[in-house]
Image (cartoon, rainbow, N blue to C red):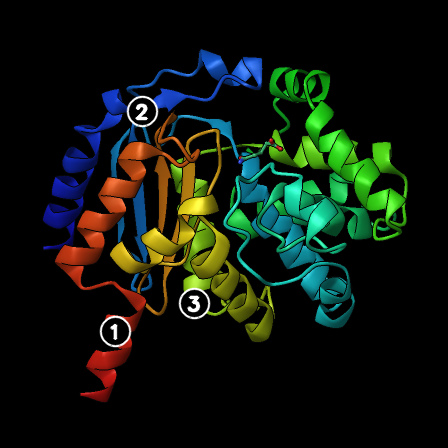
Amino acid sequence: MLEEVAKDAWEYGRKFLLQGKVADYIPELGKANPVHFGLCIKTEDGRHIEFGDSECRFTIQSICKIVSLAAALQYIGEEKVFKNVMMEPSGDAFNSILKLDTASNRPFNPMINAGAIEVVSLLAGRFSFEKMLEFIRTLCNDNEIVLDESVYRSEKATGDRNRAIGYLLKSKGVLKGDVLQTLDLYFKLCSLSVNARSLSELGLLLANGGISTTTGKRLLDKKVVRTLKTLMLTCGMYDRSGEFAVRVGIPSKSGVGGGILSCVGGRMGIGIYGPALDEKGNSIGGGYTLEYLSEHLNLHILDSADAKEA
Ligand SMILES: NC(=O)CC[C@H](N)C(=O)O
């Protein structure tokens, strides 16, 4: 049953690929093949379902915001993190600088660039890139995650808007560390190569409240996981997060490399790769596939809450 629905969902999502567009504002990302499309689902009871280009490597991009926030919440603590960044959906594009200068000194949330850059600044003095690499490899149960050097160079060469955000945060006294060191770590984290399988593993870890289903070890505190999932639900799909929450209702985080990481509490982790993006920067096929899965497997977070109450 799950296998069949997953296959249908993958096929359904695939139909929309030609309506999307590969990101090219980071020139190296423009080389992706828009018809690549992979889905990987890992369930709590050990099932593993994959279709299409689920082993294809791509850069994690904005999905690294989950990893940097996880590290900051786990090792620096919620109080300090949310003193520096808010928890509100911004309703603006992920790389917008607008509200940062007009509405608030603190970035609106850790899922947009300004918020993630602030979170990474908290990590930059304490955690080397190598430490963060080890952390993400553990969370994703994937030792083959490496830095994609060409995307990193491309991103660094064209990252003026992100540097502008960093300097604006510094000028307001919100970012305390070194801007270029912070940005370097941010660009490297965005340029880590994952696949749909690694994302499904991280999704499963979150679905399982922070305990690895492979080793039985707790990797993240329960409360950290709850905070991550709440922010994924409210802010994880850029300025489409509200619509996505209504239509799909699965905590998810997307990246302009084409990845989507999703988790269904107590049930499954889902990883998607589809570099053809909608106009907000989310994998277009991925969004439709998740909508299909949600509808046919009753995965909307609020439906499941209702079902328990009934
Ligand atoms: N939305 C994204 O995936 C953005 C990440 C990208 N590295 C950037 O900072 O612009």
Q: Residue furthest front?
A: 102
Rounded to the nearest angstrom, the CA distance separating label 1 from label 2 is 31 Å
Residue 143 in view in this figure: no
The quarter holding residue 218 reads bottom right
Tell me if 244 is positioned left or right of 164 in this view.
left
Of circles 1 and 2, the one toward us is: 2
The kind of residue tagged 3 is Asn
Name the residue that disc number 3 marks. Answer: 208
Q: Residue furthest bottom?
A: 309
Q: Along the polypeptide, which appears first: circle 3 or circle 2?
A: 2
Instruction: Find residue 207 and report its horizontal and vertical position in percent.
Output: 41, 64
Ligand 1, seen in the image, is in the quarter at top right
| Few, some or many residues within 10 Å of mark 2 (<14, 14–19, 20+) | many
The kind of residue tagged 1 is Ser
Residue 258 badge: none
| Few, some or many residues within 10 Å of mark 3 (<14, 14–19, 20+) | many
User: Which quadrant, please, contains the N terminus?
Assistant: bottom left
